[in-house]
Amino acid sequence: MKTSIQRIRKAVIPAAGLGTRFLPATKAVPKEMIPIVDVPMIQHIIEEAVRSGIEDVVLITARHKEAIENHFDSNYELEDTLDKRQKEELAEVSRRVGRLCNLISIRQKNPAGLGHAVLCAEPAIGNEPFAVLLGDDLIDAPVPCTRQLINIYEQEGSSVVGVMSIPPQDTSKYGVVAGKALSERLTDVTHLVEKPAPEHAPSTLAIPGRYILTPRIFDCIRDTKPGKGGEIQLTDALQLLAERERLLAYRFEGDRYDTGDRLGFIDATLAYALKRPELAPGVIDLMRKHLAKK
Ligand code: G1P
């Protein structure tokens, strides 16, 4: 690691959205608390951050999201009751979640876009480089995706966004990047467009919600006008960042699931259940049973 490069210790996780893509489930329950098997989606995301070396998680939150903070706190009543019933293993499941990281919660008072949400984290981030992880994207990889990006940041000393190749018809779902290929996986980014129509997309390299950013992004966000949907888009601020300092894109290794989409959610649920030895045989039997009926 170059000596001038600061260690990435903090991650921002925007979690202020209304979750309208998942109604009615999200009417009273934050979408981040919906589980994949038995682990809330936000816990999968925070575990990726922690396994990547993150210590402090800055959660950008909103009204009615208290369940997320409670989940990462201790729950004395539950843990004590489990201890008294000699269910120490279950008590430890609860305690471990409470110990995962330091959680710093900041309210985004109006839904002004992802760029605005990241700017809300500035008082907790200060003048340090940091990671951003979006909660709708689960990435299953032996080396966590955020760790892969931190490794690139440590080698290259510049901001880096995780990218994946997508089918051309899907460009309108993502921030799309283009630039000069430096190697098979690394691109020097010159252009970013938020959710372009396929005919206007500069490439088919999309950002599925993983970023390592230098603190210069905050000024870029402040200088960004409302874009797509009238919101301050992080992708537009990244375009400014790419003009002011080097921005890289890294095609990460791993399986990505869009859990904000109903089919993507079912895909993730099946994949994560099949990875659990105690569940896999039962899940396969269930799938056979349902397929036989089709
Ligand atoms: C956001 C970002 C977009 C990114 C996507 C990844 O969009 O604005 O650039 O590609 O997340 O999931 P959203 O899906 O929140 O509309």
Image (cartoon, grey):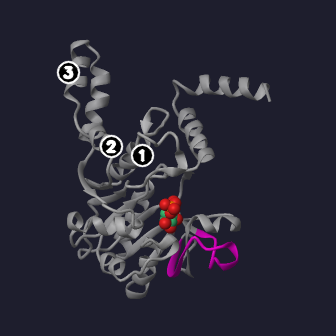
Residue 187 is left or right of residue 106, and the answer is right
Q: Secondary structure at mark 1?
A: helix
| Of the image marks 3 and 2, the number of the one nearer the N terminus | 2
Q: Are marks 1 and 3 in contact (CB under 8 Å)?
A: no
State the mark number for residue 80: 3
Q: What percent of the width, then of the height, locates residue 226?
A: 44, 77
Q: Nearer the viewer, mark 3 or mark 2?
A: 2
Is residue 153 or residue 191 the one in the foreground? Answer: 191
Q: CA distance from mark 1 to mark 2?
A: 7 Å
Q: Which residues are magenta?
A: 186-205
Which residue sits furthest bottom?
A: 243
Q: Are marks 1 and 2 in contact (CB under 8 Å)?
A: yes
Which residue in the protein does label 2 denote? 68
Which residue in the protein does label 1 denote? 32
Q: CA distance from mark 3 to mark 2?
A: 21 Å
Task: Mark 2: give few (<14), some (14-19) or many (20+) Cα within 10 Å.
Answer: many
* Residue 139 seen anywhere in this rendered image of the structure: no
